[in-house]
Image: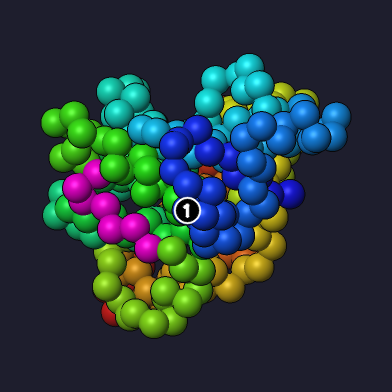
């Protein structure tokens, strides 16, 4: 399933159609909503706003909009286990987040590194990341997103094209719904709108690419990616981080 693009701007229909084409999305013209089927309540919409763009479920958007809210996340100083995975690395280290998603983990990694490359293969998600970065104007969050380099690509193509240019590679392959609890809205949206990445070659490529560490985010009950045992793991209530330390002879 893909989101449907709608616009809340005064831009011409031609501009919006061009954007829909670039993002590979169907376009719903404002005023044609009543022609939508009853399924519209379960449909995700990508709303292009005058200032910010966001995802919403259903045309009425009764729930809180889903967007790359770097300002809100940067001001939430709660530390996660992800930062513990970076312990011992210098603050000038470089990171590649190969599966950027909404960019929340990349923002956290920016607090303990000098640069973060965000790779996102899904065009509409790349668009929301761009929008989130553009709207990050406060001093502290700006100091973090200024470390970002955003690339629309499949991580495999990126790894094949470049060699050993980052100290750390972070992987968050989408894992399916587990248990009865629903995930946070943005994570649930990713699960609803993207396919689980079942291929294992990404870890092998990341291990070949990183100079110092590869960090893999997993559900606590999931097996090791590629059945490859990590150097160590840090487990939380729901999520486990598997850390692969690259030997100096690498």
Q: Which residue is mark 1?
A: 15
Q: Which residues are magenta?
A: 145-151
Q: Residue at x 62, y 68 (%)?
A: 200
Q: Nearer the viewer, residue 108 or 244?
A: 108
Most extreme residue toward the right is 38
Query: Residue 160, position in %: x, y?
Result: 44, 81
Q: Can see residue 120?
A: yes
Q: Does the magenta-highlighted stretch encompass residue 187?
A: no
Give the left or right position of residue 36, taking residue 233 as reference. right
Most extreme residue toward the top is 62
Q: Is residue 87 above or below residue 38?
A: below
Q: Residue at x 64, y 48 (%)?
A: 27
Q: How dense is the environment of label 1, judged by Cα within 10 Å: few (below 14), some, or many (20 and up)?
A: few
Q: Quadrant of residue 11?
A: top left
Query: Residue 110, position in %: x, y?
Result: 26, 45
Q: Is residue 209 above or below residue 140?
A: below
Q: Residue at x 26, y 35 (%)?
A: 136
Q: Nearer the viewer, residue 228 or 6?
A: 6
Q: Can see residue 171?
A: no
Q: Does the magenta-highlighted stretch encompass residue 147?
A: yes
Q: Is residue 73 above or below residue 169?
A: above
Position of the C terminus, as image quadrant, is bottom left
Task: Label 1: state its secondary structure.
Answer: helix
Q: Residue at x 28, y 67 (%)?
A: 166
Give the left or right position of residue 184, taking residue 159 as reference. right
Give the left or right position of residue 247, taking residue 1 as reference. left
Query: Residue 174, position in %: x, y?
Result: 61, 50
């Amino acid at each position: 399933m893909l989101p449907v693009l709608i616009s809340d701007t005064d831009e011409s229909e031609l501009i919006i159609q061009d954007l829909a084409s670039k993002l590979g999305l169907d376009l719903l013209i404002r005023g044609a909503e009543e022609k939508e089927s009853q399924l519209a309540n379960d449909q995700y919409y990508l709303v292009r706003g005058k200032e910010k763009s966001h995802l919403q479920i259903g045309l009425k958007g009764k729930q809180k909009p889903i967007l790359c809210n770097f300002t809100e996340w940067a001001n939430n100083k709660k530390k996660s286990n992800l930062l513990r995975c970076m312990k011992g690395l210098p603050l000038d280290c470089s990171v590649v987040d190969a599966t950027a998603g909404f960019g929340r983990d990349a923002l956290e990694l920016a607090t303990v590194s000098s640069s973060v490359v965000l790779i996102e293969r899904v065009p509409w998600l790349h668009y929301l990341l761009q929008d989130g970065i553009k709207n990050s104007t406060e001093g502290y969050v700006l100091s973090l997103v200024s470390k970002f380099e955003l690339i629309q690509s499949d991580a495999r193509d990126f790894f094949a094209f470049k060699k050993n240019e980052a100290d750390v590679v972070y992987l968050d392959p989408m894992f399916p719904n587990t248990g009865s609890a629903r995930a946070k809205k943005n994570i649930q949206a990713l699960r609803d709108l993207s396919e689980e990445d079942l291929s294992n070659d990404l870890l092998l490529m990341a291990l070949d690419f990183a100079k110092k560490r590869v960090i893999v985010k997993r559900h606590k009950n999931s097996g090791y990616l590629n059945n490859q045992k990590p150097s160590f793991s840090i487990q939380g209530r729901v999520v486990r981080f598997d850390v692969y330390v690259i030997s100096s002879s690498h």
